[in-house]
Image: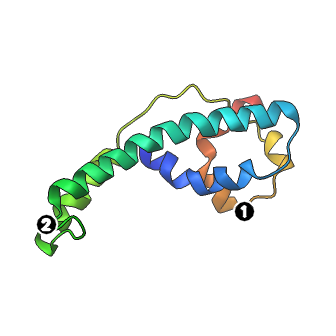
Amino acid sequence: MKLGDLLMAKPVLDELMRQRLNGRMAYQMAKNTRLIDNELLAVEAGRRAIFERLSVDGHTIPDDKLAEANGEFEELIQQEVDLDLYTLTPEDLAVFTLTPAQVDLIMFLVDEAGE
């Protein structure tokens, strides 16, 4: 999966973390979220490094550097990561109330072969 996938899934995972679950599912979601959060810390560090390098006053990236900053950030979030995540079955998803858009963002956690 790509770092960008993790970044996009973060709000959905945060919402799931606030729901009451059985012990097994709560453990799996907590473990997954911790691993993902660690990867996202690296994304944030990379974003800050890009900003610090290209900003002129520590607050603003000049217009002529925006495309470069966006390109570097895009490169960063396109990096593939291999995390040992617990997968969910479609049946596991039944305990959540999710929109199709939310499910789409966490599809990397779903093992459809486990149906």
Q: Which mark is residue 72?
A: none
Q: Which quadrant of the view contains residue 88?
A: top right
Q: Which residue is denoted by mark 1 in the rendering?
A: 99
Mark 1 or 2, closer to the camera: 2
Image quadrant where one finds the C terminus: top right
Label 2 Cα crowd, 10 Å radius (few <14 / some 14-19 / many 20+): few
Q: Residue furthest right?
A: 22
Residue 12 location (% of width, % of height):
64, 55
Residue at the spot 31% in from the left edge and 52% down from the top edge = 47
User: Taking 19 as reference, is 8 left or right?
Assistant: left
Where residue 21 appears, x then y in whole percent?
A: 85, 42
Q: Which residue type does callout 1 highlight?
A: Thr
Query: Residue drawn at (64%, 61%), measured in percent from left and top?
Result: 101
Query: Does residue 68 sit above or below 7 in this rendering?
Result: below
Q: CA distance from mark 1 to mark 2?
A: 42 Å
Residue 22: x percent and y percent?
Answer: 88, 37
Determine the secondary structure under disc 2.
loop
The answer to whether residue 111 of the structure is visible from this angle is no
**Residue type of the residue flagged with mark 2:** Val
Considering only order in the chain, which callout, 2 or 1, is on the residue closer to the N terminus? 2
Apparent side of residue 8 relative to residue 30 in the rendered image (left or right):
left
Left or right relative to 96: residue 55: left
Provide the secondary structure element on which disc 1 rests.
Answer: loop
Instruction: Give the color scheme: rainbow, by chain, secondary structure or one colour.
Output: rainbow
Q: Is residue 10 left or right of residue 24?
A: left
Q: Position of residue 11 (x, y in %)?
A: 60, 57
Q: Which residue is mark 2?
A: 56
